[in-house]
């Protein structure tokens, strides 16, 4: 148990569906992150939030829409996805963003399949 | 962007030490070196980090070259539960980025 919980663990959706991924952290951290992990590729940072403000958008397509209502919760809203978006989506949190000795705590991820 | 290079896979016998190498020749003076590992069906978990000096904790040791262009994660006695993908990561000064490489898949033989 890392203190970062992601739901659902598995998701199958069609290309025309709209769905949301949820992440919750119980660590009192101020920064939250979304990563994408595709088969045989390095983890790709997607978004960073620090004190609920988005500080990084790593050229992510607009069909991925993040939301951070407070420092404990992070959502990733999905719409009109493509099959190549199928991947493991990981959420992480840390005490602060941008501090190079930060330790990030990861959730177990949501395995997304787009049909 | 700063980049890390690791071997794709390594094998070790149970209860023997394991040395996992990482090259990061483009590291800048204030970039930290982190190691995480990812067990099957889990997210990455923190192992250890350092800046210039060698570091020890209950999980592992980190040996950093004097020029900081490479580092080695040392597992002192590998167990079957240490089988995972190990990532060497640079945290880039002035950004919010962790630069993950493709990692080393460690197989531990009983």
Image: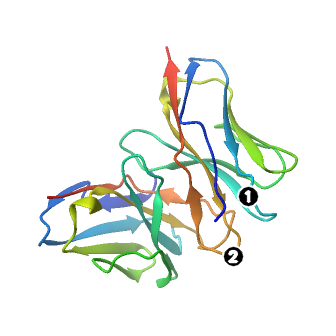
Disc 1 vs disc 2: which is toward the camera? Answer: 1
In the image, residue A15 above or below residue B13 = below
Residue A70, position as x, y percentages in the image:
41, 81
> x, y percentage for residue B78?
59, 24
Which residue carries the number 2 mark? Answer: B94
Picture coordinates of residue A105, whole percent (x, y): 51, 58
How many marks overall? 2
Q: Is residue B53 above or below residue B14?
A: below
Residue depicted at 32% across the width and 80% down the height: A62
Which corner quadrant of the image does residue B11 belong to?
top right
Label 2 neighbour load within 10 Å: few <14, some 14-19, many 20+? few
Secondary structure of the residue carrying tag 1 is: loop
Q: Nearer the viewer, residue A114 or B39?
A: A114
Q: How is the image coloured?
A: rainbow
Give yes or no for contact between labels 1 and 2 (Cβ–Cβ under 8 Å). Answer: no
Give me the residue at 78% from left, 50% from top.
B69
Q: Chain of mark 1?
A: B
B56 vs B34: above or below = above
Q: Disc 1 marks which residue? A: B26
Q: Taking the image as drawn, is residue B56 in sight?
A: no
Q: Is residue A84 left or right of residue B17?
A: left
For the residue carrying disc 1, how many other residues have a C-alpha within 10 Å: few (<14), some (14-19), or many (20+)? some
**Where does the image place residue B49, in percent across and percent down from the top left?**
69, 51
**In the rendered structure, which disc, 1 or 2, sits on the residue that comes first in sequence?**
1
Q: Point out which mark residue A89 bears.
A: none
Instruction: Name the residue: 52% across, 73% down.
Output: A31
Question: For the C terminus of chain A, which image quadrant?
Answer: bottom left
- Tag 2, which chain? B
Residue with the most extreme right position: B66
Q: Quadrant of residue A76?
A: bottom left
Q: Is residue B90 left or right of residue B84?
A: right
Taking the spot 37% from the left edge, 73% from the top edge, the residue there is A74
């Amino acid at each position: 148990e890392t203190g970062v919980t992601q739901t659902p663990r598995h998701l199958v959706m069609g290309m025309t569906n709209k769905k949301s991924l949820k992440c919750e952290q119980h660590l009192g951290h101020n920064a939250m992150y979304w990563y994408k992990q595709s088969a045989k590729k390095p983890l790709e940072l997607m978004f960073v939030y620090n004190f609920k403000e988005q500080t990084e958008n790593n050229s992510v397509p607009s069909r991925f829409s993040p939301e951070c209502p407070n420092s404990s919760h992070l959502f990733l809203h999905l719409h009109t996805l493509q099959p190549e978006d199928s991947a493991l989506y990981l959420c992480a949190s840390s005490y602060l963003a941008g501090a190079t000795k930060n330790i990030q705590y990861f959730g177990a991820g949501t395995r997304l399949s787009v049909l | 962007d700063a980049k890390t290079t690791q071997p794709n896979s390594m094998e070790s016998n149970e209860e023997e030490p394991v040395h996992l190498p990482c090259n990061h020749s483009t590291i800048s003076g204030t970039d930290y070196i982190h190691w995480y590992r990812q067990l099957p069906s889990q997210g990455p978990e923190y192992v250890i980090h350092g800046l210039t000096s060698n570091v020890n904790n209950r999980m592992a040791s980190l040996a950093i070259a004097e020029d900081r262009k490479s580092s080695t994660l040392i597992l002192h006695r590998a167990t079957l539960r240490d089988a995972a993908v190990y990532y060497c990561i640079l945290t880039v000064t002035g950004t919010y980025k962790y630069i993950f490489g493709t990692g080393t898949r460690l197989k531990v033989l009983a």
